[in-house]
Amino acid sequence: MHASKGDRLVVHGRVVGQHDHVVEIVEVLGPQGSPPYRVRAEDGHETIMSPGPDSVVDHRKASDRL
């Protein structure tokens, strides 16, 4: 998994009815775009994540999604 600052990290719901969790990558802490990542949720909460196999990186920047 490789990401850049500004990409979105999508963590898929694990059970039926659970929604995907989408956060913005604000800092890449690993070498050459690899995890861990500092991420920010919509509510402004920041944390450090090492995503698992249920996660994907959306490489589109915020300006590309408009």
Image (cartoon, rainbow, N blue to C red):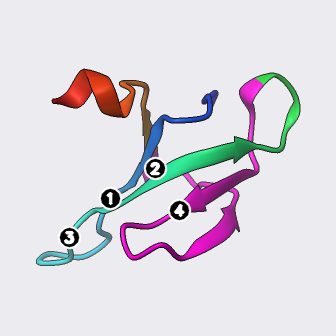
Q: CA distance from mark 3 to mark 1?
A: 7 Å
Amino acid carrying label 1: it is His
The segment highlighted magenta reads: 33-55
Residue 41 on image: x %, y %: 44, 67
Query: Badges 4 and 1: C-beta atoms under 8 Å apart?
Result: no
Query: SS of the residue at dot 4?
Result: strand
Q: Closer to us: mark 4 or mark 1? A: 4
Q: CA distance from mark 3 to mark 2?
A: 13 Å
Residue at the disc numbered 4: 40
Q: Quadrant of the N terminus?
A: top right
Provide the residue designation for mark 1: 12
Q: Considering the image in quadrants, where does the C terminus appear? A: top left
* Left or right, 53 with reference to 59: right
Which kind of residue does numbered mark 4 sit on? Arg
* Rendered location of residue 32, percent (x, y): 81, 22
**Where residue 23 sits: x, y (%)?**
44, 57
Identity of the amino acid at label 2? Ser
Residue 56, relative to residue 41: is it above or below?
above
Residue on which the image places disc 2: 55
* Element assignment for label 3: loop
